[in-house]
Image (cartoon, helix red, strand yellow):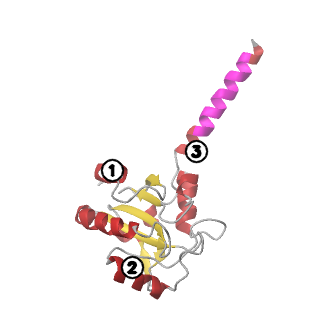
Amino acid sequence: MFSKKICLVYIIIIMFSLINKTIAQYEKLFFDLNIKDIQGKMINFSKYKDKTILLVNVASKCGFTKQYSGLQALYEKYKDKGLVIIGIPSNQFGGQEPGSNKEIKDFCEINFNITFPITDKIDVKGKNAHPIYLWAKENYGNSTVPKWNFHKILINKNGKIQKTYNSFIKPMSKKIIKEIELIL
């Protein structure tokens, strides 16, 4: 009888510890953060309040680079309804974003006609990760930490993380579109 009570206590403790990890406290919202754009100007995310945001870590020399076309198509389809896509270059995966900010900007505009915001090249994982990615991990967990280029984090109008998508999920996939339409 005593061991059953101990087991029950442990089960309850484990359940509550799992619940606490999935219910983020969000001391800060996405809209409280900022980052420099590709030209070095500060982007205060407060200007995107009440918008749906798709953060994507991008790279110019990756097998997934063709996703830029899908990202631009997604942006064009939903920007007037409140979707903002933000491309975040990172060179942390196979050295696939070695260029300068100017080279990245030119590549995106020339090859994919990108019109959504692109940021300064940053680290998206590890001890030097940009505060955006530290915030995401703290509030939503390891699924926000990119495993490769073109990892996606969907942020709702309340400034909280809605879902994450790995690199293999294409921007125009039914999974992403369904979730975006749900929260726009």
Residue 115 image position (x, y, % from top left)? 32, 76
Element class at badge 2:
helix
Residue 84 image position (x, y, % from top left)? 34, 66
Task: Write down the residue under mark 1.
Answer: 174
Q: In the figure, 125 relative to 174: above or below?
A: below
Q: Quadrant of residue 133?
A: bottom right
Q: Residue furthest right?
A: 2
Instruction: Judge depth for marks 3 and 2 and give the one in front.
Output: 2
Task: Write down the residue under mark 2.
Answer: 108
Q: Nearer the viewer, residue 175 or 47?
A: 175
Q: Earlier in the sequence, mark 3 or mark 1?
A: 3
Instruction: Judge depth for marks 3 and 1 and give the one in front.
Output: 1
Task: Write down the residue under mark 3.
Answer: 21
Judged by its main secondary structure, the magenta piece is helix
Marks 3/1: CA–CA distance: 28 Å
Q: Earlier in the sequence, mark 2 or mark 1?
A: 2
The answer to whether residue 65 is magenta is no
Please state the extent of the stretch shown in magenta in the rendering. Answer: 4-18
Element class at badge 1:
helix
Marks 3/2: CA–CA distance: 37 Å
Which image quarter is the C terminus in? Answer: bottom left
Q: Residue furthest left?
A: 80
Residue type at mark 1 is Lys
Residue 27 image position (x, y, % from top left)? 52, 57
Label annotation for residue 64? none
Residue 122 image position (x, y, % from top left)? 55, 75
